Image (tube, grey):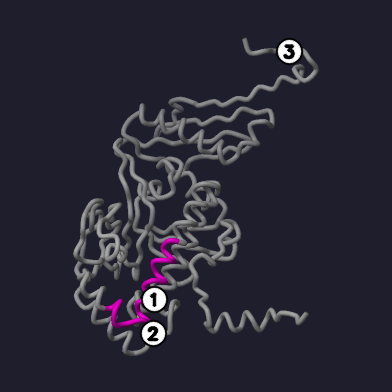
Amino acid sequence: MAANSPLIEKLRYAVDLTTDDVCCLQDVMAEPRTVPARRDLISAGDRPEEVHLILEGFAARYKLLPDGSRQIMAWLLPGDFCDLHVAILGQMDHSIMTLSECRVVDIPRAVIDDLTTTQPRITRALWWATLVDEAVLREWLVSMGRRTADRQLAHLIAEIQLRLEVAGIACCDGFDLPVTQEELGDTLGMTSVHTNRTLQRLRQLMLIRSDGRRIIIPDRQALWEYAGFDPLYLHLQRRGSAYEQIAAENHPRQPM
Amino acid sequence: MPRYFFHLDDHRKDIDTEGTELRDLDRARVEAIAFAGAYMRDEPDFIWDGREFRVHVADVHGRILFTVVVLAVDYPDARQDGGARLQ
């Protein structure tokens, strides 16, 4: 269990939060509720008056086609906002459901509006979070379009493990994956059979092991290499961060 | 729901050790084609190494219920001005 909330852990990668910022965010997250698994948090067409934040568990953005088939377009992990954008867009163009049981905070839109007018650092951090969501979506497009099934699944596992680590939830050797194979297939654009066989393949290659719901990653470097995973798109190295300083020092530009 | 096992048979035999629960045999037939197609999309080269690509679907007792066979046929004569034409 993280000492700090997953949202605060995650937003530290966006900006330097002050103690006041942290208090402000903690106030906003004061009253979470529990939502059972496989329950819609919000549906396409809704005009929500609240913004939802996941504190525990996994949720998914999805759309259903008329023939009943489903595409899951994003996974929402602890520290992820579901629908920050409806403060501006007003109406949901997709649905969000819980995959596992979740602890969720419902934040009135007025509170978000107030944050954006009075708290510039927090606002910047929230903006960063929505931009990273977009970057993840772009990477998922690449995965779905061009990565082979094995590498696509490996890439997803690599990404989810790192995102959970950033939120202070997981460590580098694995995480709990509370989704069915059908949900995994709907995420990857693969049938249940193909998903099942692809999971077996990654186990055969010893890139992952399973222990019930737990995915264990015996060698993270090997997984990243196989998946072609470069965490650049998660934007964990921000301008002016300590990491950027060190990187610049190690790759000096030669004067002309 | 019954469990079906989708074994791959190309240059390496790839046994399904877990199976997938599907509604019925008709569903399994559809899934076998979809699976074969998805697999070929990822690895188009191997069909040309002279072997057939098969997906065997078996039940929980190991009995093969049906097989999807994909076969590519090469006509080297066509490249010397002889051989089959599409009518």
Q: Residue furthest right?
A: B80
- Mark whose residue sits in front, 3 or 2: 2
Label 1 in the same subunit as label 2: yes
Quarter of the C terminus of chain A within the rendering: bottom right
Element class at badge 2 = loop
Segment tinted magenta in the rendering? A115-134
- Mark whose residue sits in front, 1 or 3: 1
Residue A76 falls left or right of residue A171: left
Q: Which residue is drawn at 56% across and 64% down?
A: A230
Reading the image, the residue beneath label 3 is B83
- Would you call the spot at circle 2 few (<14 residues within 10 Å), some (14-19), or many (20 or more)? some
> CA–CA distance between discs 1 and 3?
68 Å
Reading the image, the residue beneath label 2 is A17
Is disc 1 in contact with disc 2, using a CB cutoff of under 8 Å? yes
Label 1 in the same subunit as label 3: no
Instruction: Give the chain of mark 2.
Output: A
Quarter of the N terminus of chain A within the rendering: bottom left
Element class at badge 1 = helix
**Residue B45 in magenta?**
no
> CA–CA distance between discs 3 and 2?
74 Å
**Residue A123 in magenta?**
yes
Residue A251 screen position, x and y as percent = 69, 79
Q: Residue at x 30, y 35 (%)?
A: A67
Classify residue B83 by image quadrant.
Answer: top right
Instruction: Give the chain of mark 1.
Output: A
